[in-house]
Image (cartoon, helix red, strand yellow):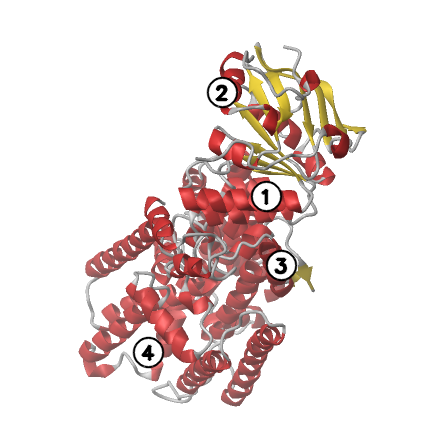
């Protein structure tokens, strides 16, 4: 079915340069529960990084820490090699980080344009500037080749699941964002719509954005990911180029935190977590 | 959702495939993309057949009410100029109260206090202008009344938005509290609870004329022409700008048709109002209450449809979590909505006081609340939030006012009036619930 590492030879670390976002030694606990322990993560521009892990592994917590919804207890973020502090969602969106949550956060009764500009409406003479908003929304959608919507003035309630996901992603990339995090973008989608969304993820990569996809679905992961990071019980179990993994090794990392399967001969192991 | 997916799987093989548009075509409100008048009408009919009827039920209701009551009212007085103007004056209170409460309904909340909060304001205004006691000028009295109403609304809104109390309970209690406050205010001064607007004092006259004053027929015509021209110009230039800039715009003929419809309505209204309605002497011209209702309508319509605030009201009604994540300050918007609801209630109660010729401690605050909410819902506003327009208040108010007026003409006893209006309300809520169900199962939601 979905071939392993169809993305072909992804550029080696030498060609990638510095990661857009470097996460180093992140700790996060909720009361006595240690949700993240000393987590490192690198997200590169122009690369799709899949974040995998079993339920409760800490995928969502890590995402929410990067999005500024949770405050980290320890560790450091480096954005374009500079140390940054992310204390609130506003901080992260100021850096250019946008998150598309699983529930998409779209208002069904508003149309596509209204949803895409929600909270950042353009104003002319004190009134909403609908024409300009409609034009830029249309431009963004067509640049992502989201062509299946009939009219960008149709209410979001009338869209299919894949189209809704597309609108949510378009909304996220509209604001000169550099890193887009997608939380389970293909959960609850049919085959066709899953393909649409994966196409969209590839287009984000072509635009040079850093993309992080949280997914359970290994088919999707191997279909689009350039890099894979696996969390196990709040620790980074393994992180490397996608072609350094195969399906079984990802499952091993997800379930046991380690893999005994032989890795690619030239696979660089130095980025593996120290767990 | 499941249904949608199946449709998509069957009809849309690949995202770039042009035939994929067929997937969306099933669900798009077709008039958005219609390019000619013919297409637009076809699309409109298709949408009605699909169960998404917009304001059609309420227009139909108005037509039925007109025919039924005109047919059976004694001497066919229902459509006489006197009665029609009368009907509008009676409906005006429902309309204004409804246009205010729509702001709470759009959030998915409710405001049950509007009757007595407004009445408190009206009582204050009527007391303040009394020449025997305080002697305030009319404008200061009205401003004070509306300010008090707005303040009350802001307090209720704060309790609802920041303490997260249920709007049902807060405004139910508010209705009770301000029923008491209204009685206290009415008890002040030497009027034994019935301060009146009768008398030759200019300030009393202005309040009395809110409902009963008329505009000179010539001025009425000129004013109407100016207003229709302004509205037409705005609609025309907005559509024209979209056409020129290459955005999808309604066909020219549709724009012209809409402007024409507005003009016809305006001419009919002014023509009816300019008939001499008095049995003896002259009573002609457009009553003040019509421009007052129009002003409330225009201001709130612009606020809801054309401003950031209005957009956030709809967003909160549709998905509060989405609004919160988009950076909307929910508490501020909710507080403001309840402030607007109470402020508008003040205007409505002032009209009621004017109609009554004073204030009375028998003010029917609770039934006015239900009639206002009924008007909004009958007009097409959803009780579930996120769907509704200011226009719905006017249309629904006409329906409720028409039913009361018609039954009054037929001398139907009050117990039957209650029953009929109650049944109509249940009917309107059922339509709301049904259209909501069809909207969530894939058809298009009305906004």
Which residue is located at x 62 percent, y 44 percent? Answer: A204
| Residue A6 percent across, percent down from the top left | 55, 36
Q: CA distance from mark 2 to mark 4?
A: 82 Å
Q: Secondary structure at mark 2?
A: helix
From the viewer's perspective, tell me whether residue A187 is left or right of residue A132: left
**Mark in the foreground, 2 or 4:** 2
Which residue is located at x 54 percent, y 71 percent? Answer: B206
Label 3 near label 2: C-beta < 8 Å? no
* Residue topped by disc 2: A248
| Residue B277 percent across, percent down from the top left | 37, 85
* Residue topped by disc 3: A139
Q: Secondary structure at mark 3?
A: helix
* Residue topped by disc 1: A202
Chain of the residue on which disc 1 is drawn:
A
Label 2: how many Cα within 10 Å (few below 14, some 14–19, many 20+) = few
**Mark in the foreground, 2 or 3:** 2
Q: Secondary structure at mark 4?
A: helix
**Mark in the foreground, 1 or 2:** 2
Label 3: how many Cα within 10 Å (few below 14, some 14–19, many 20+) = few
Chain of the residue on which disc 4 is drawn:
B
Label 1: how many Cα within 10 Å (few below 14, some 14–19, many 20+) = many
Q: Nearer the viewer, residue B271 or B132?
A: B271
Q: CA distance from mark 1 to mark 2?
A: 24 Å
Of the 4 image quadrants, the one containing the N terminus of chain B is top left
Label 4 near label 2: C-beta < 8 Å? no
């Amino acid at each position: 079915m979905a071939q392993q590492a169809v993305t072909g030879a992804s550029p080696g670390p030498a060609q990638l340069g510095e990661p857009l976002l470097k996460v180093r030694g992140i700790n996060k606990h909720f009361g006595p529960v240690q949700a993240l322990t000393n987590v490192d993560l690198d997200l590169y521009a122009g690369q799709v990084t899949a974040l995998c892990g079993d339920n409760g592994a800490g995928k969502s917590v890590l995402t929410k820490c990067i999005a500024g919804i949770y405050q980290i207890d320890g560790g450091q973020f480096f954005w374009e090699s500079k140390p940054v502090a992310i204390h609130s969602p506003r901080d992260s969106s100021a850096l250019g980080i946008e998150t598309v949550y699983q529930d998409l956060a779209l208002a069904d009764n508003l149309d596509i344009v209204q949803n895409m500009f929600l909270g950042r409406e353009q104003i002319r003479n004190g009134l909403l500037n609908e024409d300009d908003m409609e034009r830029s929304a249309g431009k963004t959608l067509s640049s992502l080749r989201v062509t299946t919507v009939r009219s960008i003035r149709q209410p979001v309630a009338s869209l299919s699941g894949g189209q809704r996901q597309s609108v949510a992603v378009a909304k996220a990339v509209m604001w000169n964002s550099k890193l887009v995090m997608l939380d389970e973008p293909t959960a609850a989608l049919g085959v066709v719509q899953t393909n649409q969304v994966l196409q969209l993820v590839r287009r984000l990569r072509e635009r040079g954005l850093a993309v992080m996809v949280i997914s359970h679905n290994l088919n999707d992961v191997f279909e689009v990911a350039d890099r894979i990071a696996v969390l196990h019980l709040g620790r980074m179990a393994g992180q490397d180029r996608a072609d350094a993994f195969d399906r079984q090794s990802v499952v091993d990392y997800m379930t046991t935190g380690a893999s005994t399967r032989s890795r690619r001969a030239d696979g660089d192991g130095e980025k593996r977590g120290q767990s | 959702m499941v249904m949608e997916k199946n449709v998509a799987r069957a009809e849309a093989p690949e995202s770039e495939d042009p035939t994929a548009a067929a997937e969306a075509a099933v669900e798009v409100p077709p008039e958005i993309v219609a390019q000619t008048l013919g297409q637009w009408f076809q699309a409109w009919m298709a949408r009605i057949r699909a169960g998404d009827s917009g304001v059609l039920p309420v227009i139909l209701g108005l037509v039925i009410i007109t025919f039924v009551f005109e047919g059976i009212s004694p001497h066919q007085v229902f459509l006489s100029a006197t009665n029609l103007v009368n009907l509008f004056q009676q409906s005006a209170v429902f309309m204004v109260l409804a246009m205010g409460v729509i702001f709470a309904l759009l959030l998915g909340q409710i405001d049950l206090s509007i009757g007595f909060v407004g009445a408190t304001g009206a009582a204050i205004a009527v007391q303040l202008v009394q020449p025997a006691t305080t002697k305030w000028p009319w404008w200061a009295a009205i401003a004070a009344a509306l300010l008090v109403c707005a303040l009350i609304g802001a307090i209720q809104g704060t309790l609802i938005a920041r303490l997260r109390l249920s709007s049902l309970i807060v405004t139910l209690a508010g209705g009770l509290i301000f029923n008491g406050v209204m009685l206290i205010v009415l008890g002040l001064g030497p009027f034994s609870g019935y301060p009146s607007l009768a008398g030759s004092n200019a300030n009393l006259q202005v309040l009395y004329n809110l409902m009963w004053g008329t505009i000179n027929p010539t001025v009425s015509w000129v004013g109407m022409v100016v207003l229709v021209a302004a509205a037409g110009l705005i609609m025309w230039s907005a559509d024209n700008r979209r056409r020129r800039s290459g955005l999808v715009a309604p066909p020219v003929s549709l724009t012209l048709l809409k402007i024409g419809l507005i003009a016809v309505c305006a001419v009919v209204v002014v023509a009816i109002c300019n008939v001499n309605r008095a049995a003896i002497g002259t009573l002609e011209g457009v009553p003040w209450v019509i421009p007052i209702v129009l002003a409330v309508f225009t201001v709130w319509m612009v606020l809801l449809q054309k401003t950031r605030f209005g957009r956030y009201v709809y967003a909160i009604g549709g998905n509060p979590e989405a609004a919160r994540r988009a950076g909307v300050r929910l508490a501020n918007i909710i507080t403001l909505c309840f402030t607007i609801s109470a402020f508008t209630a003040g205007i409505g109660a002032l009209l009621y006081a004017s109609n009554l010729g004073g204030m009375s401690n028998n003010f029917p605050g609770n039934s006015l609340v239900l009639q206002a909410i009924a008007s909004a819902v009958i007009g097409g506003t959803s009780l579930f939030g996120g769907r509704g327009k200011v226009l719905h208040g006017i249309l629904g108010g006409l329906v409720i006012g028409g039913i009361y007026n018609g039954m009054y003409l037929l001398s139907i006893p009050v117990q039957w009036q209650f029953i009929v209006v109650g049944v109509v309300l249940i009917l309107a809520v059922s339509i709301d619930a049904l259209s909501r169900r069809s909207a969530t199962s894939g058809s298009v939601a009305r906004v």
